[in-house]
Structures are given as C-alpha cells and as structure tokens.
Amino acid sequence: MKQEKIEFYKGPAGGWGALNSVKNALLRQDIPVKGAKTLLSANQPDGFDCPGCAWPDRNHASTFEFCENGVKAVAAEATARRAGPGLFDQYTVAELAQQSDFWLEDQGRLTHPMAYDAASDLYRPIAWDDAFALIARHLNALPDPNQAIFYTSGRASNEAAFLYQLFVRQYGTNNFPDCSNMCHEPSGSGMRPQIGVGKGTVTLQDFEHADAIFIFGQNPGTNHPRMLGELREAHKRGARIVSFNPLRERGLERFADPQDKLEMATLGSTPISTHYFQLRVGGDLPAVKGIMKHVLEQEDLRGGVLDRGFIEQHTTGFDAMAGNLRRESWALLEEESGLTEAQMRSAGDIYLGARSVIACWGMGITQHKHAVDTIQAIVSLLLMRGNIGREGAGPCPVRGHSNVQGDRTMGIWEKPPAALLDKLRDVFGFEPPREDGVDTVEAIRLMGEGRGKVFFALGGNFAAATPDTHATWQALRRCDLTVHVTTKLNRSHVVHGREALILPCLGRTEIDMQASGPQGVTVEDSMSMVHISTGINPPASEHLLSEPAIVARLAAATLAGRSAVRWHWLVEDYARIRDLIEQVFPDFQDFNRRVAQPGGFRLRNTASERVWATASGKASFHAPVVPQDTPSHQARARLKDSIVFTLLTTRSHDQYNTTIYGMDDRYRGVYGQRRVVFIHAADIRALGLQDGDWVDIQTVWADGQERRADGFKLVAYDIPRGNLAAYYPETNPLVPLSAVADAAGTPTSKSIPVLLLPHRALQAAAA
C-alpha cells in the first residue's frame, strides 16, 4: 500500500511528473515494451483512437498524440493482467463486492463470458450462444418492451451504436439512457433551441485564431490534457485565457510540454490562464450575467461595442435580454457569484478587447440545477459580438468519453427526433416506437419501482457512475436480468439482478478480425470530426467479441423471424454498417470513402455557417434570472444554526470517469488515498476542527432520507469559503436522485448542500 500523505505539488501540469507517471503506468500493467509500441499508434492515421477523452487531434498525423491520462487508459486496456474464470472461482460475488473499485479493475482484462450462479454466489463461464439465448428469452418474455432498459457508454463506436439503436427500436422501445444524460445533456438542451445545434461550433484550428478563450467549470489538466497544448500555444501568441473555477487547478495555471526539449531541460513551463477568477460553486450564471451587463453598459456609454449588424440579421430576443440586464443588481451578482463587480468588469473588458472569443465549458457547468440557463447565458454572451460562425470564435462544450458525441449522432437518445424515426421506417421497413424513453435518472426510478425488468449496458460502470448510490443499487438488484458488455471487472458486475451476465468485448487497441478481414470502427470527437480507429494488438483472449458483433448476435437471437436486417452479414464487414448509416443520416453521405481520407471528415455544423435550425430561423438571446432558490439556499434557510456547505464532486488525476488508475491526485497534492474533502482553512477553524481531522458528510435534502458518506479527511485547500470538493464515486451516495438540472435531467453532482459531522467511527471508539 502506497504511503498516504498530503504534500503540495510544486511542478507544472505535464512535465517530468507526467513522464514519470507514464512510465509507472506501463510498468504497473507489466507492458513496458508492448505499451510503448502501442502508444505510437494512438491517434495516428493507421492506428486507434484513444479510448480516453474526446478532445480532437491534429488530423491523426502528429509524431506523438497522446497525454498522460490517455496513456493510463491505453495501458489499462493493453495490460498483461487477466481476469479469467480462475479469479471468479476464487471469490464469491459477496467477496468481490467488499473490494475497492480500484482493486476490481486492477485485476486485468476479462477473458470469458460469465453468468451468475445464485446457488454458489459465483460467476461461471457460459457459451456465447447460451448467453444470447438467455437475454433473448428474458426480453421476449416481457409483456411490454418498455420494461427493458438499454444503457450506452460513450466509448461505443459509431458502428456499434448504430446497430444497437436499430436493434432496440426494432425490439420496441426508446429506453436509451446513456452517459450523456449524466454529463453534457444540458449543453444540447440549451444550445439546440438557441442556435439549432447541440454541439460546439468550433474546430481545433479556431484555437489558433482566438484572441480570447474563456474556460468555465473545466479542468483540462486532468480531464482533457491534450487541450493544454492548444492553450499553451494560444498563450504564447498572446491570446487571453480567462478561467472561472472554484478550485485552483494546476492545469489552468501552468503547463510544461513533455515534447518541448528546452522546456523539459530547463524545468520551465508556460503559463496558461492570464486571468483566474475563483467564483463560488454554482456562481457561473451570475458571473456571466455580470460580464454581459458590463458589455451592455459600455455599449450604452460609448457605442460601437455590440455587433449590431449580426444581432439584427441573425438573432431574436435582444431587447428583452438587454432590459433584463439593465435591471439586474450588481450587488446580487456579487453575492451570488462570489466575484466583485470589478472582477466581472475586468473579464468584460477582456471580452470587449478580443475580436474573436471561444467559450469552453465542462461538467462544472452542466451538473447544476440551472445548467441550461447558464449555458444559454454563455452563448448569449458570444452572440452579443457575433462570436459564432466566425474564425476563432464560438461555443466549445468539451465532452468526456471518446465517442459520447458520436453515439448521440447515431441515435442513442431517449427522445429521438421524428425525422430519425421516419428515416428508420423508410430504410428498414418497420414502424419505430414513437414514445419517448427514459433517461438515466428515470431508468433508475423505473427499476426501483419494479417496472424495469431487464437492464443491458453497452459499456460503462452504471452502478458507480450514477447518483444516489443506495437507491441505484437497490434498483439494479430488483431486475430479473442485468447484462454488462465490458473489458474489465467493475462495481456494476457485483451489484446485479437475480440473473446476471458479464460479456467481455474487444478494446480499441485490439485487432478486430471478422470474416472479411481486420475491421476499423469510427468515432466522432468533440468538434464533430469523424475518423477511423483500427486496433493493432492481438485480443486479450480468443473468447472476446467486438461490440458490433455482440449487438448483432443479440439482435439476431432476440428478433429471429421478426427482422429483415441481415445482422450476421453486417458484421462480416463494417463497411456494410457504414453504408446503412449513410442511408439514414444525410451528413454521412459517401461515408466509407470520406472516412478513409487522412484525418477523416467533419460533420456539417449549421450554426458555424450562421444557418440557424431553430423555430424562428434565428439564434436567440437569453438572460436567465439569477437563481436564489438553489438547494443550498434552501438548506441554509432551514438550518440557520448550522454551517451548510455546497459540495462539488470531482475526479482525481489518477482517474477517468469512474475508472480509477491509482490512488494519487498529484496536482492537488494527495497521495495514496481518496477519502479526502477539500475545504478552506477558515472553514476548518469555524467548525472547531483541524486540518487532517476526520469527518462524515451528510446531505441536506427535503425528502427526509438520510444520505451519508463516512470517513473523509479534511484537507485545507484554496477553495472559496462555504464550498467543498471530494472525489466520486465515493461521494455519489450524497447526490439525491431528485437533484437534477432543470430541462435536462442531469444529476447536479457539482452542487449538493451538505453538513460536515464528527466522524462517528471515532466517536464510537471514544465512547
């Protein structure tokens, strides 16, 4: 066990610390040579797309196009470790459930399909055909297809996702909860009615031309490390980089590029943010309104500030928004944002001084009750000076998983547009279900009420990724059958239904051999670039199937005699699947030829062309009301004699989504441990405690249910008073199922009202 310690990290993001971490990741997985060779094919024209984040790369053509956390993802997949039948003979499921999330995934790659045996409480090998027959039997026995739930992870390829949505809709339901529901759903929900697209409008090249880059609620150093290269170059050419974040994040402060020999040799680094505003958790909406108010006041004062021609030709709602901004109180904006009027005006001056502005955001924006309002305010700020549809400008929601955006493009959506359903009907000759399905939170409720009988997950770690852990686990255990397509063991496999299957699949790095030869799959990055990914390593086991093959064989078994789709024939050559995608989605015309070009191709983005696919035919301004009724406001009003904190859940640097690669968080100075809570030193004193003391965390919520997470060490940190940060999934039990973003349904994991209580284990020991 590595020594637990808290020690301030003095280095920059990247640099020698990153190189040392890369070396350790390859050594830990026993692949120092294989891993190094594998990485040379990451994000290359004839290689595989990194299984980590969705940040784009330079046309799959650079010498090295991977980052520290990408290395961890690749190493975890290419590992020499194996979790075969012997492991499952050694441990009952009850015993596996006692292990940590880190331990479970650290056992290595799964090698055989496994079925749960209730009599022995063991997973035992099962033949693939028997596994598909079992699932088909359960699905076909349901009186209503809507009693089945089909979850999707963002790592599924376009080909797998397309077949999956086709199969499930032929089966008869739109129950497609996916990881988008838990991260960037508010981005799409906000931007689609406002500018006509639910995706960002910028390209990677726009970062070369931006005069200012505003970054809201995002930590690229850990979550999208390759973005630091773009920010570094932007800073060096003089662009202003303005960061809004409650925490001081090293990746937003300074970065040393491991490929820069001089910087590495001199232990130097490049600053990232030119301006850093530490607002309160959830303070982004009033902060953005403050910037907008300043811009409008400058227009009123001196004129020539707004892009009047753009506003008149391309937008609606400006006058109503302007009236709202003029009436807004600076005192309220200061109180709710945690920034001073001077700070907001300073940010506004930077915006006014830039010809072209990019606005980026991450889950620090989307996982709040008022996330949609905040995103629409950010987009409205851009519209004020025509910063959409122009070189070097536009909104840039930075998504997580490497194909989460592509899965939505392929139709993984519980609320499918009628045009998609019509196209499926016309191409495949069946009538798709028209009723909306359930999102992630609704799926948990459906299972919890006993109305969701079969849960099938194409990737992901549902039990660990979701909110309200106790309720979610109870819901999964009520299912008749739970099935998980996966590469490694995780928490979801030990929190299961009455019957359960684990179906191991190929990873991105592995050769996918089908009847016509080795196959490539396609993915879409955060900037709508579609490119091909081809694995290079032998499969971890001869018993693995690809995700498209698993979906096709399940569809054939379930829909036997009811589907005209030639499922087995399609997976013999994935080009056949892409031909079908082309028939359904006009933007994929000539798919196979275009994706074969170096770097692939970009999907059309109408908003980037200033073509607004909205109800009015124009982009719209919004000036939402500054929220004063957040859960934290309500909790403080009820508990006037208690110190109510607002907790944000976050990742460590040794983590990607729910996958934990190690027990360190280097940039925040945490080593060998994860049960820590970051807190302002003055708040520790106000509680009568000391740095390093142990506490329990309890949610303050109006439903009367107790939600606790016990045993967290206080760590004094540079964070605004009244705010806390701690890692998930350890803190997911604190997020109520009913705590969701308005108009989007995303869990509000970045703004939970909580109390810090004396650690009851210590109290019990003292007693």
Image (spheres, helix red, strand yellow):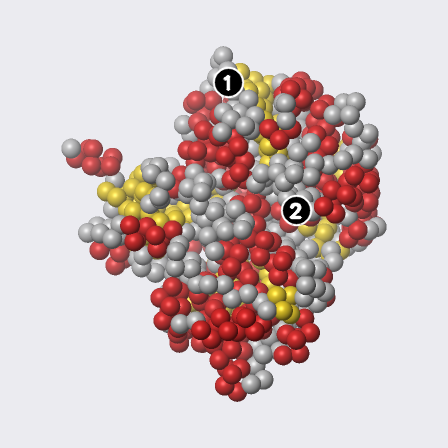
**Relative horizontal placement of residue 737, taking residue 186 as reference (left or right):** left
| Residue for point 47% across, 22% down | 93
Image coords of residue 556 (percent x, y): 75, 26
Local crowd at mark 2 within 10 Å, few (<14), some, or many (≥20)? many
Q: Between residues 11 and 439, which one lies in front from this camera angle? A: 439
Image coords of residue 671 (percent x, y): 38, 47
> Disc 2 or disc 1, which is closer to the eye?
2
Local crowd at mark 1 within 10 Å, few (<14), some, or many (≥20)? many
**Relative horizontal placement of residue 296, taking residue 561 as reference (left or right):** left
First in residue order: circle 2 vs circle 1? 1
- Whole-angstrom CA distance, mark 2 to mark 1, is 36 Å
* SS at badge 2: helix
Image quadrant assignment for residue 224 = bottom right
Residue 254 visible in the snapshot: no
Q: Residue furthest bottom?
A: 302
Image quadrant assignment for residue 79 = top right
Give the labeled residue for mark 1: 122
**Amino acid type indicated by mark 2:** Arg
Q: Between residues 517 and 172, which one lies in front from this camera angle? A: 172
Q: Could you say which disc has been placed on residue 408 in the image?
A: 2
| Residue for point 69% across, 74% down | 313
Relative to 432, residue 337 above or below? below
Residue 441 visible in the snapshot: yes
